[in-house]
Structures are given as structure tokens and as C-alpha cells.
Amino acid sequence: MENAVEYHFETEMSAYRFLNTVKHIDAEGLKVKFGRSDHHVSVKYRYVVGVFDSTLSTLDDLARELGGEEVA
């Protein structure tokens, strides 16, 4: 099943750092790109059904460390 999430950051540099860091996360079908603007990063990945998937938690923690937050 595919999951998509977008994060907003205060600065373009923070968004860029997040984008480059997330590219190296081990997640099935991972796609990372800038979102609505250069302050947004869009992340898509597939999670495995039937097992605990910590990918979203990892993304949220990393975004928080870089001053970002998930947007609707």
C-alpha cells in the first residue's frame, strides 16, 4: 500500500537537507521531491502490510529535528 506525506520547513536549506537525508532511508518504493514550494518536501513510499512500519515515525522525527512539520 502506498503512503504519501508532505512536510513544510521554515527555510529552503532545511527542506533541502531533509530531502537529501530522506533519499537514503531504506523504504520500499521511496520517492522524494520538492512539494508545493521550495519549503515543502513530498515523500511517497510503500509500506508492507502485516508488519510494523516505522518509516512515517522516522520521517516525522527527522522533519521535527530540522524544524519541519507535516502538512495536510
Image (spheres, rainbow, N blue to C red):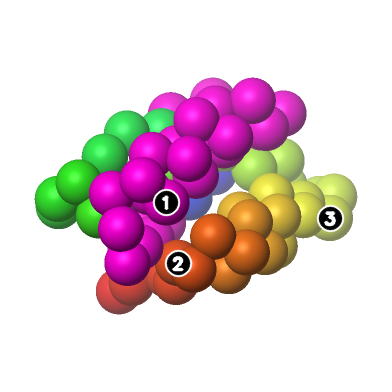
Mark 1 falls on what kind of element? helix
Residue 44 in sight here: no
Q: Which residue is mark 2?
A: 68
Residue 26 versus residue 49: which sits nearer the camera?
26
Q: Which residue is mark 3?
A: 52
Q: Which residue is mark 1?
A: 14
For this view, does 6 lie left or right of residue 69?
left
Which residue appears at 77% of the width and 51% of the height?
53
Mark 2 falls on what kind of element? strand
Instruction: Please tell me whether residue 59 is drawn above or below residue 44 in the rendered image.
Output: below
Q: Amino acid at mark 1?
A: Ser
Residue 47 versus residue 25: which sits nearer the camera?
25
Residue 12 versus residue 53: which sits nearer the camera?
12
Give the number of the mark in front: 1 or 3: 1
For this view, does 46 lie left or right of residue 44?
right
Q: Are marks 1 and 2 in contact (CB under 8 Å)?
A: yes
Q: Which dot marks residue 34?
A: none
For this view, does 19 lie left or right of residue 46?
left
- Residue 46 in magenta stretch: no
For the N terminus, the quadrant is top right
Instruction: Please tell me whether residue 25 is drawn above or below residue 36 in the rendered image.
Output: above
Which residue appears at 32% of the width and 34% of the height?
33
Which residue appears at 71% of the width and 41% of the height?
48
For this view, does 55 lie left or right of residue 4?
right
Residue 50 in sight here: yes
Give the number of the mark in front: 2 or 3: 2
Place of residue 56 in the rendered image (x, y in percent of width and height, measured from the top left): 63, 57
The part of the chain drawn in magenta is 4-31
